[in-house]
Image (cartoon, rainbow, N blue to C red):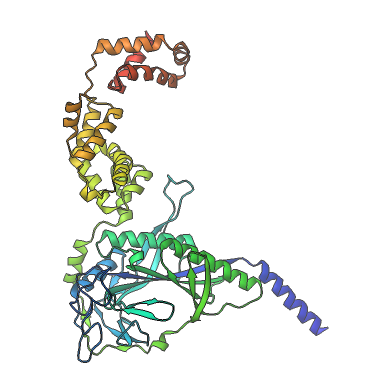
Amino acid sequence: MFQYAGYSLLATHYSLLKIMNYEAVIGLEVHVQVKTASKIFTRVGQGYGHEENTLTDPVVLALPGALPVMNKAALDAIIKSGLMLHCEIADVCKWDRKNYFYPDSPKNYQITQFDQPICIGGEVEIELPGEARNVMGEHKKIPLTRIHQEEDVGKLTHFAHDSLVDYNRAGTPLMEIVSDPAIASAEEAYAFLTTLRTTMVYAGISDCDMEKGQMRCDANISIRPVGQEELGVKVELKNLNSISYVRDGISHEIKRQKAVLKAGGTIVQETRDFDGITGTSQSLRTKEDAHDYRYFPDPDLMPVRVDQAWKDRLAAECPERPFDKQRRFMAAYDLPYTITSVLVPDRELSDWFEATVAIAGKPQAQAVGNWIANDLLRDLGAANVSLADAKITPAHLAELVGLIEAGTITKQIAREVFTESFGSGETPSAVVERKGLKDDTNSDELEQWCRDAIAGNDKAREQFLGGKDGAINAMKGPVMKASRGKANPKLVDETLRRLLAE
């Protein structure tokens, strides 16, 4: 009877396990290469695309007697990153050796920060997709554990029978940004990395090009029954080579762990490799713990003291945070979310917008935003030209918007003028004058075209007089055609309404 009862209890537990709802708990470790002229502990240059093993010196190759010297520009960059992400900047930080044996590290250890990182805490503000793409989604702040600085390692390229070790990347200044286990979904992880990359690029800290290895991400994923406080067993995902792969890899791993538990299995702590092309993962190794690395203070590098003056100087250099700018654009310029979502992620583009508004005037901000988000970006893409290399300037666009506002040209004509200015760099006024595009319609001509349009469209006339205001648009077309697109739409509308009222 006891055995039968025990069997029933186990069976009941297994059935509950199969239908139990789980939630994911995710933490990210993001490595970001800092954009400096030289490497972190030596003056040899850093960069991407150079011939293998040409960016090396005795320090990088760990030759006997070679000693590291700290690169202050790398420290400036990580402190600025911490300020951008609301971290507490430590008054003192120190350097440690993380010991392991692998061909990518000639020293057989990595210089990093263990128990005294330079940036403590912090947060990354993310936006989750709204119900509609033109509506701002929910914002959430993901807390950070720390940001510490370390040196990058070399790169291994594996072939059929051998491997190439390239030390060009070794010694590049690197930040590791560690989030709390506070991310709840693959979509939140995607939003986290998107915000992080935008912030780093905004501040000029890194280009964050994942294809070049300038930003790399490992994800720690666990699941637990909904409502449980204790974290589940975590699995680390590596080789996530794009932000989309991070999202896909996390989604895959959550499904895999749920399937294992619902089948009665056990999650083991391990590191897995995710293949973004096939959407599958495989086990690489069981996960190491910190004690496996035998951390100890680096005897060749002194601790660094960061005084308040240093922090204040870097704080003054920090740009406005992207989401703060987006909220300001919406409030100060009354821009819709759709336009700010295009302008703000690109700092150069948003600066170009504000430079144009400063010339055109604040009332023209919406018109300027529309021209940039639609026409400017379209023409830049078609010509494969960067904004910095474009011939059109903020002064050009401000002048064009002014011509439309003054009724000198119509919006339809303005598109032709914009294309001309974009291609040649000629001012809009000069284009209008050269091509004879100015609206020179006299009032008598306009009135006659409007009378003809009304007389030629009985149905639209009757609908308008019957209370259907939109019916007037059917009469505007013939007027614009008669004027070859030059007539001022505002005057056309006013004239038609006056004549219809008579």
The quadrant of the image that shows the C terminus is top left
Q: Position of residue 129 (x, y in %)?
A: 45, 52
Q: Is residue 279 left or right of residue 451?
A: right
Q: Nearer the viewer, residue 72 or 53?
A: 53
Image quadrant where one finds the N terminus: bottom right
Q: Residue at x 45, y 61 (%)?
A: 188
Q: Is residue 277 visible?
A: yes
Location of residue 4 in the rendering, given as x and y in whole percent from the top left corner: 81, 81
Nearest to the observer: residue 15 or residue 397:
397
Taking depth in this image into account, of 172 and 192 the one nearest to the observer is: 172
Residue 226: in sight, yes or no? no
Q: Where is residue 109? Give x, y as percent.
A: 32, 86
Q: Position of residue 175 (x, y in %)?
A: 31, 72
**Residue located at (43% from left, 22% from top):** 470
Q: Is residue 470 above or below residue 368?
A: above
Quarter of the figure with residue 36 = bottom left
Residue ID at (29%, 13%): 446
